[in-house]
Image (tube, rainbow, N blue to C red):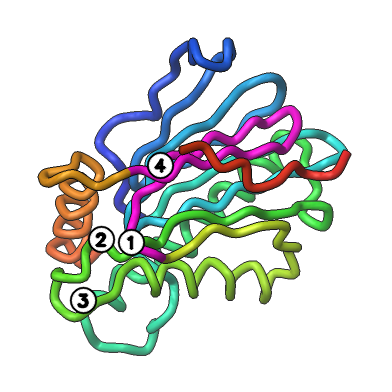
């Protein structure tokens, strides 16, 4: 069982876009259909947006640890399944709603180097590598990515159209996203267990 955030995703009305929206935190995911936005703020974490262009069913996850290193004896290896879990539960939720895995396309965001001081683990780089390798192995076509670098990102995924918008954020001292990810990473390890429109998905 993967460690998830302590409360369910937040549902709210996004006044900027005039849409119902769902905000996800580290360890969460959400699948939906219709005119709804899924949003998150990323530092070292990675989010994958998956979309079926025929049924217009889409979803987003937000994970902290990658899925490689399964043969290592470290605590990180014990937690490495969380990236795989985040991908599979999102895919399965979309399949239950009527999406077809063979049609799914992906967009991947995040993986900034915000937690480089946390031991020697470059969390952002490992998350990014895992997400891209998972999509390659599973045969899910990657349409776009915005990964690595040193800044947090705010991501809006518009499920009905497959469109994604990304805002790159300045990182101030004591930034909430950095504190939240550091606390979440500590829990996982301890438990061992201006706007940039990136792309528009094809119609």
Q: Is residue 154 left or right of residue 97?
A: left
Of tags 3 and 2, the one toward the viewer is 2
Q: Which residue is mark 1?
A: 150
* Alpha carbons under labels 3 and 2: distance apart: 21 Å
Q: Name the residue rendered at 58%, 26% in the picture.
A: 37
Q: Earlier in the sequence, mark 4 or mark 3?
A: 4
Q: Earlier in the sequence, mark 3 or mark 2?
A: 3
Q: Quadrant of residue 4?
A: top left
SS under mark 3: helix
Report crowding for label 1: few under 14, some 14 to 19, many 20 or more residues within 10 A (C-alpha): some
SS under mark 4: loop
Q: Which residue is mark 3?
A: 75
* Alpha carbons under labels 1 and 4: distance apart: 23 Å
Query: Which range of residues does the magenta coloring cover?
Result: 149-169
Q: Quadrant of the C terminus?
A: top right
Q: Is residue 197 left or right of residue 41?
A: right
* Alpha carbons under labels 2 and 4: distance apart: 20 Å
Q: Is 75 part of what is drawn in magenta? A: no
From what the image shows, is residue 34 above or below residue 116? above
Tag 1 and tag 2, C-beta contact below 8 Å = yes
Nearer the observer, 52 or 101: 52
From what the image shows, is residue 26 above or below residue 73? above
Q: Quadrant of residue 34?
A: top right
Q: Which residue is mark 2?
A: 114
């Amino acid at each position: 069982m993967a460690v998830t955030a302590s409360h369910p995703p937040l549902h709210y009305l996004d006044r900027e876009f005039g849409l119902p929206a769902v905000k996800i935190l580290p360890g969460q995911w959400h699948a939906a259909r219709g005119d709804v936005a899924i949003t998150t703020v990323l530092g070292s974490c990675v989010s994958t947006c998956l979309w079926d262009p025929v049924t217009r069913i889409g979803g987003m996850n937000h994970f902290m640890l990658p899925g490689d290193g399964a043969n290592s004896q470290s605590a990180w290896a014990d937690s490495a399944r969380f990236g795989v879990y985040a991908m599979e539960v999102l895919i399965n939720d979309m399949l239950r709603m009527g999406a077809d895995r063979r049609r799914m396309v992906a967009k991947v965001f995040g993986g900034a180097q915000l937690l480089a001081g946390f031991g020697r683990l470059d969390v952002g780089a490992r998350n990014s590598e895992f997400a891209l390798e998972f999509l390659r192995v599973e045969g899910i076509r990657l349409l776009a990515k915005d990964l690595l670098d040193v800044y947090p990102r705010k991501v809006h995924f518009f499920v009905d159209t497959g469109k994604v918008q990304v805002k790159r954020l300045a990182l101030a001292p004591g930034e909430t996203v950095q504190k939240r990810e550091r606390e979440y990473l500590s829990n996982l390890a301890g438990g061992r267990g201006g706007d940039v429109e990136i792309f528009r998905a094809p119609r």
